[in-house]
Amino acid sequence: MASVTSTWTEPSDSPLTLLLLGRGTDPASERGVDCPGDLPAPSDPDLVARATAAKAALGSRVFVLGHHYQRDEVIQFADVTGDSFKLAQQAAARPDAEFIVFCGVHFMAESADILTTPAQRVILPDLAAGCSMADMAVLGQVETAWEHFEDLGIAGDIVPVTYMNSSADIKGFVGRNKGVVCTSSNANRALTWSFEQGSKVFFLPDQHLGRNTAVLEMGFDLDDCVLYDPHKPNGGLTGEQLRNARMILWRGHCSVHGRFTLDSVREVRERVPGVNVLVHPECRHDVVRAADYVGSTEYIIKALDAAPAGSAWAVGTELNLVRRLALAHPDKQIMFLDRTVCYCSTMNRIDLPHLVWALEELVAGRVPNVISVDEKTAHEARVALDQMLALP
Ligand code: SF4
């Protein structure tokens, strides 16, 4: 069996690089970021011991979820790791756990709150851990768009579909308008179902997942898709464009996956002959077209697990995950698709000091940073989530 030494190259140890990679700390800027408590110092040498002790003291009362894009220092304390939907399901499968500590971002904690029992409390260790993509679709903007579709007389033809990476408000909007939530694994099935219910889809908030699924997996033409820009009157589209469109894509994107370019793909192919380019469907359409393989985070993990020793892979997804996969598979040549650092800055808000703080607060009988979705929104969002679970 062929064997190669891992070619993962650690960036230079400059303070800035270490900060970007989440393996360094800046006490001057990191303390107290939207955190109501007294955070432990990032330089505290006992942080690992403190987190271990607090978690042990809480026992089965606490369940810690870690998203794949989290830092290693946090992932080591996760009871389960996964993508956003898997983690929400895992939370729902643990009704005995009083506290769900969600090491992820805000919309994920909302989904966990929607799917868990009213007695359970979902905690986000740093409230500043949002998602730039989810924030690109605000309920008021989406309702304005829908009113415009109603004025044009086309709303009855449209099925709204939202990616899991959206706020509870948006999932609620989709639920009350008879739509469905999707993940990057089931977007094709969700769109197939939606086109059986209506002739058009209004896809929120990630234009790339919507376009890539419709064009590359379902055979639509790029001309069937229009881009609705919430910052322009009527989305920047004429009535005729909206009437003719099959896919109305919201102008949103992931700031991490949106950074990979066609040049990244060309450059790695020149540099590493025979390399397999594997990307997430949140990447831009031209990047996904140029890649060899495309799939969700779970697909990427499985593809690399199954890859033969000695094979080379350039992976277009978040840096923490690619780095962990490269270190887990030293017999394969696994590299980041782009040569510049590209990590999810909001995910990285959840660091060890915030996790220690949240766990120790729970031990002290205080429940910090609770993420709670109001009952009406939760009910409507659950309708859209249940529709996803019922997809054929
Ligand atoms: S990686 Fe992109 S979609 Fe995921 S949380 Fe970060 S900004 Fe949001």
Image (cartoon, grey):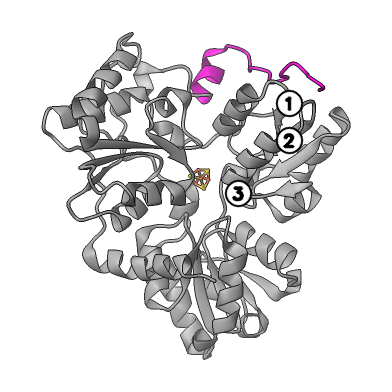
Circle 2 crowding by C-alpha within 10 Å: few under 14, some 14–19, many from 20:
some
Please name the amino acid that badge 1 sits on. Answer: Lys
**Distance from Cα at disc 3 to Cα at disc 1:** 20 Å
For label 3, being within 8 Å of ligand 1 is answered: no
Q: Earlier in the sequence, mark 3 or mark 2?
A: 3
Residue 332: give its label: 1
Quadrant including the N terminus: top right
Residue at label 2? 307
Tell me where residue 102 appears, x and y as whole percent. Answer: 34, 40
Q: Nearer the viewer, mark 3 or mark 1?
A: 1
For the point 41% across and 40% down, which residue is it? 104
Q: Earlier in the sequence, mark 1 or mark 2?
A: 2
Q: Which picture quadrant has residue 341? A: top right
Q: Nearer the viewer, mark 3 or mark 2?
A: 2
**Distance from Cα at disc 3 to Cα at disc 2:** 16 Å
Q: Secondary structure at mark 3?
A: loop
Q: Magenta includes 345?
A: no
For label 2, being within 8 Å of ligand 1 is answered: no
Residues under numbered marks 1 and 2 in contact, where contact means CB atoms less than 8 Å apart: yes
**Distance from Cα at disc 1 to Cα at disc 2:** 8 Å
Magenta segment: 1-20
Q: Is residue 148 left or right of residue 10?
A: left
**Residue at the left extreme of this rendering:** 365
Circle 1 crowding by C-alpha within 10 Å: few under 14, some 14–19, many from 20:
many
Please name the amino acid that badge 3 sits on. Answer: Ser
Residue at label 3? 296
